[in-house]
């Protein structure tokens, strides 16, 4: 029998030492189980969770040093090349790739839920037309909780499944409606004859006045973006979904919390920020100036689309997206477009610069996905919304895994308090 590994924590102030078991997963670094530590009256301090595994999970594995990403054990490169987004959704949610029959059934179950309640449509009128679509997404996805009282018992696996299907099916419809509302066009109902990604493009770009057929290469590029963004283990938005869900909140409310966390420019908002940055740079000749600013510690400017908390090697999603980026630019004849030339030059300069090499700051997936979405004519303020559509399956799969986990506890981190010590209240006339 394998010997149990133990870490011993000792103190130099007479506090008795404490033994902490070491746990191993199927892949990746071992973790020290610190649950016993609280008995000493002490806690660990780890802002940003740089050294903390917040849960155990069987969904997604990342090796940031080697640049590997697996969904349920399958390398992302294989899924991006051979699979479809809905197949990946099934895999993330259920743990295995579907058989043909399972696949057909899953697609049918999604398709019959793509429409949204008519009453939900009137929610949009409460928003300003120029509201950021992510703001509308937070509100409308959260509002789904108000429509599905029949499936909100989170302890019932069938309810959880129906909620997952509803979210996968309805989020693209809600997202396309955000765009239509923004530009003042009528909403387009889903067309269930189309595939999942094509249907989203249809709801975004079709109008009731004309026939619309999406370019198959655009469908393929967007499908790839969806697959690459489907899950990414315990990132900020997923951890938000888990934390919100740990209290027993319903999956629609938790997904809305995930969308809010995704919006930030350090996370999913980066794809939009990349394009804004390129716009600000303005010309290839200005790149050295902006790279110098990114390296200047006194300047808060960072190169958007570069760096990653976990990947200290090329992000494998970025490698696949880079390929797609070049394919799409060639297909659409955009290689010589000023903006894309600037992006490619920035990539070249940063990859050769000592500052970026030393800190292992490679272009990340959002650098390339931002460029691809721009080439596909997706409006800038919809970039992060597209990330949110793709990530919905990751959030709901992780939420479902957490709810099924017998070790689940409400998430309740502690703190190192640095505020005033106890003091007594004094009336205002006695305060100086
Ligand atoms: N430009 C310039 N310097 C950078 C950048 C950047 N984009 N990213 C990190 N650094 C520097 C940082 O200043 C620090 O330098 P030093 O060691 O001299 O103090 C060092 O690299 C480490 O940075 P950090 O902020 O401690 O790293 P982190 O793991 O906390 O942050 C990050 C990761 C992704 C938030 C950060 O790299 C960043 O802000 N990147 C730009 C935003 C971006 O592209 N985000 C999308 C991430 S991928 C999509 C997703 O998964 O959501």
Image (cartoon, rainbow, N blue to C red):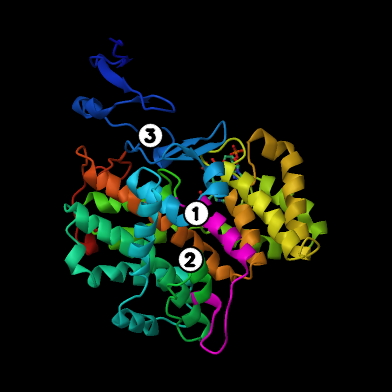
Q: Which residue is mark 2?
A: 195
Percent position of residue 127, x then y: 40, 81
Give the mark toward the camera: 3 or 2.
2
Horizontal arrangement in the rendering, residue 199 relative to residue 283 (left or right): left
Horizontal arrangement in the rendering, residue 320 relative to residue 143 (left or right): right
Q: Which residues are magenta?
A: 203-230
In-front residue for pair 51/174: 174
In-front residue for pair 332/300: 332
Q: Residue at x 75, y 60 (%)?
A: 330
Mark seen at residue 84: 1
- Looking at marks 1 and 3 on the same chain, the residue that comes earlier in the sequence is marked by 3
Q: Residues within 10 Å of mark 1 (few under 14, many from 20)?
A: some
Q: Residue at x 61, y 65 (%)?
A: 216
Q: Residues within 10 Å of mark 3 (few under 14, many from 20)?
A: some
Q: CA distance from mark 1 to mark 3?
A: 33 Å
In-front residue for pair 423/376: 376
Q: Residues within 10 Å of mark 2 (few under 14, many from 20)?
A: some
Q: Quadrant of the N terminus?
A: top left
Q: Residue at x 30, y 10 (%)?
A: 3
Q: Is residue 286 above or below residue 149?
A: above
- Label 1 CB less than 8 angstroms from ligand 1: no
- Looking at marks 3 and 2 on the same chain, the residue that comes earlier in the sequence is marked by 3
The residue lying furthest to the bottom in this view is: 209
User: Label 1 near label 2: C-beta < 8 Å?
Assistant: yes
Q: Is residue 64 above or below residue 263?
A: above
Percent position of residue 206, x then y: 54, 80
* 307 is within the stretch colored magenta: no
Mark 1 lies on a secondary structure that is: loop
Q: Which residue is mark 3?
A: 52
Q: CA distance from mark 2 to mark 1?
A: 10 Å
């Amino acid at each position: 029998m394998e010997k149990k590994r133990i870490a011993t924590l000792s103190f130099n102030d007479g506090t008795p030492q404490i033994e902490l078991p070491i746990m191993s997963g199927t892949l990746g670094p071992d973790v020290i189980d610190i649950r016993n530590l609280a008995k000493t009256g002490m806690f660990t301090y780890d802002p940003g969770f740089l050294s903390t595994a917040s849960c155990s999970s069987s969904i997604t594995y990342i090796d940031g040093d080697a640049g590997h990403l697996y969904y349920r054990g399958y390398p992302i490169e294989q899924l991006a090349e051979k699979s479809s987004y809905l197949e990946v959704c099934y895999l993330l949610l259920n743990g295995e790739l579907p058989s043909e029959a399972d696949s057909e059934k899953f697609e049918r179950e999604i398709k019959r839920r793509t429409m949204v309640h008519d009453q939900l449509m009137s929610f949009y009128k409460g928003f300003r037309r120029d509201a950021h679509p992510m703001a509308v997404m937070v509100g409308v996805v959260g509002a789904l909780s108000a429509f599905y009282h029949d499936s909100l018992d989170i302890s019932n696996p069938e309810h959880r499944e129906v909620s997952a299907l509803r979210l996968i099916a309805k989020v693209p419809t809600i997202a396309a409606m955000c765009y239509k509302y923004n530009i003042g066009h009528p909403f387009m109902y889903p067309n269930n004859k189309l595939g999942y990604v094509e249907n989203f493009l249809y709801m975004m770009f079709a109008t009731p006045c004309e026939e619309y057929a999406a370019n198959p290469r655009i469908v393929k590029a967007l499908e790839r973006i969806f697959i690459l963004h489907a899950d990414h283990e315990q990132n900020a938005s997923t951890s938000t979904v888990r934390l919100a869900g740990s209290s027993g909140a319903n999956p629609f409310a938790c997904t809305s919390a995930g969308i809010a966390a995704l919006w930030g420019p350090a996370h999913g908002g980066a794809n939009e920020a990349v394009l804004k940055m390129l716009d600000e740079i303005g010309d290839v000749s200005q790149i050295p100036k902006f790279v110098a600013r990114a390296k200047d510690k006194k300047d808060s400017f960072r190169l958007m689309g570069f760096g990653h908390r976990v990947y200290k090697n090329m992000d494998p999603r970025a490698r696949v997206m880079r390929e797609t980026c070049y394919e799409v630019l060639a297909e659409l004849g955009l290689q010589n477009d000023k903006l894309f030339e600037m992006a490619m030059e920035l990539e070249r300069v940063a990859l050769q610069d000592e500052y970026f090499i030393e800190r292992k700051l490679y272009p990340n997936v959002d650098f390339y996905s931002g460029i691809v979405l721009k080439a596909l004519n997706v409006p800038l303020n919809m970039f992060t919304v597209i990330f949110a559509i793709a990530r919905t399956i990751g959030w709901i799969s992780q939420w479902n895994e957490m709810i099924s986990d017998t070790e689940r506890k409400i998430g309740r981190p502690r703190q190192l308090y640095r505020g005033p010590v106890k003091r007594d209240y004094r009336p205002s006339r006695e305060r100086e």
